[in-house]
């Protein structure tokens, strides 16, 4: 994992609630150490990184 | 020094005086006796000329018109209203200090309520409490003083009950979780404004205003032992795995000697806060995980159990549970999440 930077995201209420719930459940199941929304988002990006990368490659000449 | 030349003339050499000058020259002694300066002889008491007192002119007799009150109406006519204004001023002078003192009590109480509404942190501080009580007692004392001084038989007794009620109610509202007086650290605690450690929540736990409700349910020595707590979380874990969320079928939990209360988040604290010493199990509507709030060995404890997993977020961790305590930042992390996610209603939330 690279350096961690702090950022802010503009989300809808539902999206934010969803992420918080996922974080809470993962923590309660022992999948995450804490109920961290950041960790959920990092995991989301990590798992979708190939598709996102492919999208960038497709836009190149 | 400059020398001024003076010419001294004997009295005998003075030119004769005229009658007016003679009168002036007649001096009086301290006793009121006159003497002639020319001869130096006393010339006896001079009768002081006084004017004959003149009899006051008789007031014209006025026949009163029917319906006119000579005490007020005539005075009003004669003085063009000034008398009534003076009367009003006198009444105001008598009543105003009493009414003002009473109004101050009400205003201080109202201002305190506004502060408490908009800033629970300041409103719940001991410093604010003592300032408020000090002002109220001062205003109330001023009210009693003014009442006694002005003998306000009208306003004094009427306002006494409501004003005294306001003062007493405000004094009774001592912020929970605070030391009242006399205990070590009392004076320094008055000036402590670190919001994260401001309230004594019991069991050595300190927290900010968001968790002040916990101070109303402070852990007592008679609470679960860590072993009993471990049996509870173990039984819950087994029952959820075997029977799901049907609490009525949880046989392992039912067999516990120190049986917990199983309830929903909205009732967990408000109705069953006194059962924390044996454990309160909170069953959510939408998860296969339960929360356990309890007093364990005189400390606050919170855990989540389900899916073969047990995680302690606050307090002692029994065997078989993951210890997820974060003592430095327990208020911002998972414990807050637990309260929100399991919709655990607190006293403050119920008042809103």
Image (cartoon, coloured by chain):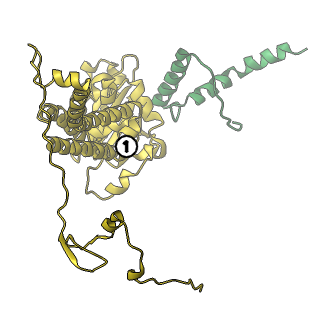
Classify the position of the N terminus of chain B by image quarter.
bottom right
Residue A53: quarter of image: top right
| Residue at far right of view | A61
**Pointer 1 chain:** B
Residue B69 vs residue A2, the one in the foreground: B69
Q: Colour of chain B?
A: yellow
The residue depicted at 60 percent of the width and 18 percent of the height is A11
Residue A29 vs residue B139, the one in the foreground: B139
Please tell me how crowded label 1 is: few (under 14), some (14-19), or many (20+) other residues with Cα within 10 Å.
many
The residue depicted at 62 percent of the width and 20 percent of the height is A10
The residue depicted at 20 percent of the width and 73 percent of the height is B43
Residue B54 vs residue B114, the one in the foreground: B54
* Residue B309 shows up from this direction: no
Relative to residue B158, is residue B189 drawn left or right?
right
Relative to B321, residue B77 above or below: above
Give the total of numbered labels: 1
Q: Secondary structure at mark 1?
A: loop
* Residue B248 shows up from this direction: yes
Residue B289 percent coordinates (x, y) = 39, 24
Relative to residue A3, is residue B34 drawn left or right?
left
Residue B111 percent coordinates (x, y) = 35, 34
Relative to B84, residue B318 above or below: below
Residue designated by label 1: B315
Q: Which chain is green?
A: A
Residue B230 percent coordinates (x, y) = 32, 39
Relative to residue B171, is residue B329 drawn left or right?
right
Residue B318: quarter of image: top left
Relative to B77, residue B332 above or below: below
Classify the position of the C terminus of chain B by image quarter.
top left
The residue depicted at 87 percent of the width and 16 percent of the height is A60
């Amino acid at each position: 994992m690279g350096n961690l930077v702090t950022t802010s995201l503009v989300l809808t209420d539902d999206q934010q609630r969803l992420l918080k719930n996922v974080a809470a459940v993962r923590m309660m199941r022992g999948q995450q150490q804490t109920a961290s929304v950041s960790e959920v988002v990092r995991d989301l990006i990590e798992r979708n990184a190939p598709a996102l990368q492919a999208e960038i490659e497709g836009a190149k000449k | 020094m400059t020398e001024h030349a003076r010419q001294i003339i004997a009295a005998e050499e003075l030119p004769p005086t005229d009658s007016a000058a003679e009168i002036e020259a007649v001096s009086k002694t301290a006793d009121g006796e006159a003497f002639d300066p020319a001869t130096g002889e006393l010339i006896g008491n001079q009768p002081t000329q006084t004017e004959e007192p003149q009899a006051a002119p008789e007031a014209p007799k006025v026949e009163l018109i029917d319906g006119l009150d000579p005490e007020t109406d005539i005075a009003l006519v004669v003085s063009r209203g000034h008398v009534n204004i003076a009367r009003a001023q006198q009444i105001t002078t008598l009543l105003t200090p009493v009414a003002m003192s009473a109004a101050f009590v009400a205003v201080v109480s109202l201002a305190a309520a506004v502060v408490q509404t908009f800033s629970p942190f300041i409103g719940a501080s001991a410093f604010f409490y003592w300032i408020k009580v000090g002002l109220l007692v001062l205003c109330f004392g001023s009210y009693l003083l003014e009442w006694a001084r002005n003998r306000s038989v009208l306003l004094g007794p009427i306002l006494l009950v409501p004003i005294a009620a306001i003062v007493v109610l405000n004094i009774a509202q001592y912020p929970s979780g605070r030391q009242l007086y006399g205990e070590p650290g009392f004076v320094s605690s008055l000036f402590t404004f670190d919001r994260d450690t401001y309230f004594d929540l019991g069991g050595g736990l300190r927290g900010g205003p968001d968790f002040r409700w916990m101070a109303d349910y402070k852990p007592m020595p008679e609470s679960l032992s860590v072993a009993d707590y471990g049996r509870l979380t173990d039984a819950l874990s087994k029952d959820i795995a075997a029977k799901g969320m049907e609490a009525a079928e949880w046989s392992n939990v039912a067999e516990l000697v120190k049986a917990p209360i199983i309830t929903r988040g909205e009732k967990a604290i408000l109705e069953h806060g006194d059962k924390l010493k044996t454990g309160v199990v909170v069953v959510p509507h939408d998860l296969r995980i339960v929360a356990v709030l309890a007093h364990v060995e005189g400390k606050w404890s919170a855990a989540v159990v389900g899916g073969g997993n047990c995680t302690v977020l606050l307090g002692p961790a029994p065997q078989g549970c993951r210890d997820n305590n974060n003592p430095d930042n327990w208020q911002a992390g998972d414990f807050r999440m637990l309260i929100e996610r399991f919709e655990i209603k607190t006293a403050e939330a119920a008042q809103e």
